């Protein structure tokens, strides 16, 4: 367990992130690794590959080949993470990663909230899922501020939420 934790979560850039293709290839040749774990790590690898292809720049600055690599890798991540979750719906890891995949590459009927609910059904205290859900709501919250600024004054509450003074 300690080795797995160090491979996946060591400080800075993890061993897995630096060597993701080699780690996944080695796991595919290892019979004693549970298939759900192999698929989870493969899905995680493809998420990392997608962001490496796209880069961390503004969407408007991403070149066509960056979007192509991003889209292809996210599709592979979705495939592997969904099958991993189907094999182990009692584990929160794959469902938690699917929150981000759904934000980047949503299938009809799938939302970050759907995957968050699946995480909570498996393990209510899996904190990475809470961060991923909050991240998924950032755009909605930013847009809601813009919407409130354009509402007619009588519809905008005066004072803090819940303050009923006129």
Image: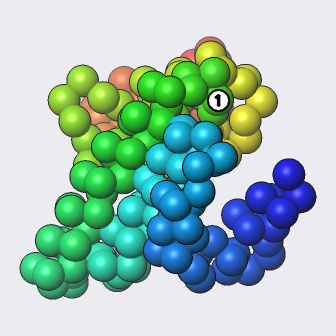
Q: Which residue is mark 1?
A: 91
Q: Is residue 117 visible?
A: yes
- Between residues 148 and 155, which one lies in front from this camera angle? 148
The residue sitting at 39% across, 62% down in the picture is 46
The residue sitting at 77% across, 30% down in the picture is 125
Position in image of residue 144 (x %, y %)? 38, 40
Quarter of the image holding residue 17? bottom right
Q: Where does the C terminus fall, quadrant-wise? A: top right
Q: Is residue 40 visible?
A: no
Vertical relation: 58 (above or below) 143: below
Position in image of residue 77 (x %, y %)? 36, 52
Vertical relation: 160 (above or below) 142: above
- Between residues 74 and 110, which one lies in front from this camera angle? 74
- Specify few, some or many for label 1: CA neighbours under 10 Å numbering under 14, 14-19, or 20 or more: many
Vertical relation: 135 (above or below) 148: below
- Between residues 20 and 47, which one lies in front from this camera angle? 20
The residue sitting at 40% across, 34% down in the picture is 83
Q: Is residue 59 left or right of residue 127?
A: left
Q: Is residue 45 left or right of residue 79?
A: right
């Amino acid at each position: 367990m300690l080795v797995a934790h160090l491979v996946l979560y060591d400080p800075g850039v993890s061993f897995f992130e630096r060597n993701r293709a080699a780690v996944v290839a080695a796991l595919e040749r290892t019979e004693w690794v549970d298939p759900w774990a192999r698929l989870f790590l493969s899905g995680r690898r493809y998420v990392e590959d997608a962001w490496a292809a796209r880069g961390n720049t503004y969407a408007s600055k991403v070149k066509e080949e960056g979007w192509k690599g991003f889209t292809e890798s996210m599709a592979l991540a979705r495939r592997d993470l969904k099958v991993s979750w189907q094999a182990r719906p009692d584990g929160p890891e794959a469902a938690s990663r699917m929150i981000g995949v759904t934000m980047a590459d949503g299938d009809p009927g799938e939302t970050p909230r759907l995957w968050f609910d699946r995480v909570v059904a498996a393990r209510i205290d899996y904190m990475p899922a809470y961060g991923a859900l909050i991240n998924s709501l950032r755009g909605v919250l930013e847009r809601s501020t813009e919407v409130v600024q354009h509402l007619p004054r009588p519809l905008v509450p005066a004072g803090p939420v819940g303050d009923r003074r006129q």
